[in-house]
Image: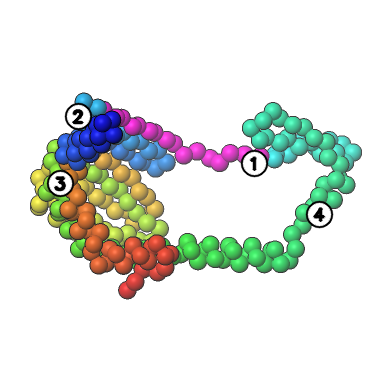
Amino acid sequence: MVLEIILLLVAVMILLILFVSFHIMLVADKKGEQSYYKLIIKWLFLRYTVSKSSISGSDDLARGEVIGKMPENVIVCKVREGTPTETRNLSRDDIIGAETTKKPAEEEIIGLEEKKEGEKEGEKKWTIGKIVHLARMLFHPILKLVEDVLKKIHISEIKCNLLYGFDNPADTGIVSGYVYALRGYLHTQYDRIRLYAEPTFVEEKMDVHMLADISFRIASLVPAVVTFLLNRDVRRVSWALIRKKDIPE
């Protein structure tokens, strides 16, 4: 009997989650190194709020910091590891011996250089050209997903102000074409969605200010998400990303 009651409660909870509307309000702001966002989720009589603001600062000092030198071949080092400060007196012979014993072999140096070259190659994998190629492959599936989702949600207000620029002005121009196409589509199809975008060709920049107030039912979004995931191009790209291979042509 108890098991049946638990299963009934779980079934009722799942139905409530699927068919009772969620109300979401979002405020996000990013300007330079400063960022802030506040997210409010309402469901039934419950309310959940998340907010965070951050400012990126300079890197911390190194853990081992030389703060002074003493006469007669003695160096005072200050070590900071989050524990009480330790002060050690090291002779020059100790330092020379440590450098000699810790000097890496030539094979290790070659291995580190090859690893760094491999990391650079991995970093170059996601270039603007490949991102544009990915956008072309997924443009129609994503557009279809956006259309289906926007039809199923109630939009009180969505506004986004975007100021962007890349290190290469040509990349900024390419991205601007897609941004303007999306803005024109949204403005003609939806009265309560406004996207304001301004490119800058003189510096690398990404400033965003966004306001959103929407409500939806999860059950109404399931068909749109399933259709998107079953799309042939989406499956090809997903498989390539999972296997960490290049995006298929």
Residue under numbered circle 1: 62
Q: Amino acid at mark 3?
A: Ser
Q: Is residue 27 left or right of residue 75?
A: left
Identify which residue, 90 or 177, lies in the foreground: 90
Identity, as a three-letter code, of the amino acid under mark 4: Thr
Q: Secondary structure at mark 4?
A: helix
Residue 240's tag is none
Q: Disc 1, disc 4: CB below 8 Å?
A: no
Label 3: which residue? 220
The colour style of the image is rainbow
Q: Nearer the viewer, residue 108 or 180?
A: 108
Quadrant (top left/top right/bottom left/bottom right) for the C terminus: bottom left
Q: Which residue is the site of mark 2?
A: 44
Q: Residue 62 magenta-drawn?
A: yes
Q: Tell me the distance, in whole angstroms, between the alpha carbons under discs 1 and 4.
A: 22 Å
- Kindly identify which residue carries mark 4: 101
